[in-house]
Image (cartoon, grey):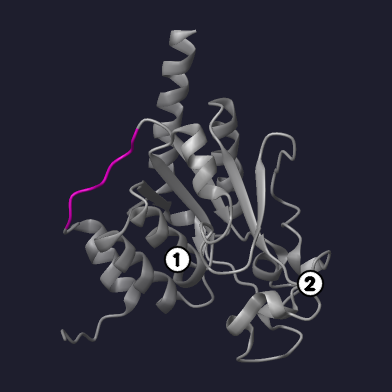
Amino acid sequence: MQESDETARQIYLKLKANPSRARFGFGSKAVLVNVDPQKAYTRPDLFNTAYTTHPDQLEFTNQLANRFRRLSWPVVWTHVAYKESGEDCGIWGTRSNTVDSLQNIGYESERSEFDDRLHIDKEKDTIYTKKMPSAFFETQLQSLCVWHRVDTVVVTGGSTSGCIRATVVDSLSRGYRTIVPEECVADKHESYHYANLTDMAIKYADVLDVAEVLSWLDAQLVDLESAS
């Protein structure tokens, strides 16, 4: 094992400046998967489980979603919520039992609600309630991707080290080019955040500045308008 006195942030920034792997690249059509941007994780003024990494994360997410809709590409939002008994959280919910515990995010609770700053189109967008880390696990996301014939998955939300990573690994495992806009994912601590950005960038995804992802989407919009 290689040892280092550098912080996780320093290691990530070195990799970002000098990538060690070729990119997977953008494909021809994408789905936007926004993983658990719910108040339990986005409102530190309300809940101990919440966190903020980039202050404009949700605004950037809105910008991505707007462009996806203009392209008629699918936009997905996931959140976690459980029965009062917590039994549908399974073994994942057995390590603690406090008001902050995962399995105590109830249906119709404030913790389960999407952040009010998000622009969610309930007519056009797809919303899944998931139970486990990955947005693919026992949801209809795979079927949605097949129906829309996407080859690229853009992932936002939190946490970087948890549900983002799990979704990214599942996305790659299903054969999708996978994109993580750096400013659009967040975690509780910078060490977890940057360590997992590094690992995903090396193994599973293209971790890009959100500006580059927005520019790619804008180019698709120009092509669409030119063709119409």
Observer-nearest residue: 165 or 138?
A: 138
Q: Earlier in the sequence, mark 1 or mark 2?
A: 2
Determine crowd level at label 2: few under 14, some 14-19, many 20+ residues with C-alpha closer than 10 A.
some
The stretch of residues the image draws in magenta is: 21-27
Percent across and percent down for residue 35 are 57, 58
- Name the residue type under label 2: Gly
Badge 2 marks a residue whose secondary structure is loop
The image's mark for residue 166 is 1
- Name the residue type under label 1: Ala
The image's mark for residue 147 is none
Q: Main secondary structure of the magenta part?
A: loop
Q: Is residue 160 left or right of residue 45?
A: left
User: Residue 203 appears in which quarter of the rendering?
Assistant: bottom left
> Residue at 43% across / 65% down in the picture?
165
Image quarter where the N terminus lies is bottom left
> Residue at 74% across / 35% down in the picture?
123
Please tell me whether residue 167 is drawn above or below residue 6 in the rendered image. Answer: above
